[in-house]
Image (spheres, rainbow, N blue to C red):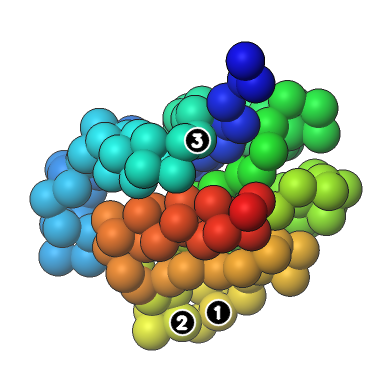
Amino acid sequence: MTEQPRILVLNGPNLDILGRRDPAQYGSVTLDDLRQVVETEAATHGLGVDFRQTNREGELVEWLHEALDDHAAVVINPAAYAHTSVALHDAVEALTVPVVEVHLSNTWKREPFRHVDHVATAATAVIAGAGADGYRLAVAHVASLLG
């Protein structure tokens, strides 16, 4: 029996307080809600999920390195690190698997400093502004790329 392909779903800083953080911008969705969206969509495509969150940039980089050998694809919401981290850009660029970046809000409709996205320039695709549905769309897109 073939092992189920696994996707790595990474969530960056402050996403652990979703539902309490700026509901006008992010709504009432929680990180657990996002996990459920991802796991439900992944199951429809026969994919396993490794879902993680950290507030530490270096930990995100180390987890991305794991995808070099252990995952079929990556979905990442780098949160604020998208706008500041060349290290995340480099880690994503080093991957040979599909990487879909997702943001709950449309970062290009927000403050000008959020219009720079270092991770996007290395990602396979970017989905922004679709709320929790962006995660579902990211998983569906990854599934289509994996065939």
Instruction: State the residue position of label 2.
Output: 108
Tell me the tag on residue 115.
1
How busy is the neighbourhood of tag 3: few (under 14 within 10 Å), some, or many (20 plus)? many
Check the image and report above or below for 24 versus 85. below
Dot 2 or dot 1: first in sequence order is 2
Residue found 40% across the figure and 61% down from its top: 137
Q: Secondary structure at mark 2?
A: helix
Left or right? Give the position of 51 relative to 87. left
Dot 3 or dot 2: first in sequence order is 3
Task: Choose top left, top right, bottom left or bottom right for residue 109.
Answer: bottom left
Dot in front, 1 or 3: 3
Tell me the tag on residue 47.
3
Provide residue 93's location: percent of width, then percent of height: 83, 55
Residue found 31% across the figure and 69% down from its top: 130
How busy is the neighbourhood of tag 2: few (under 14 within 10 Å), some, or many (20 plus)? some
Dot 1 or dot 3: first in sequence order is 3
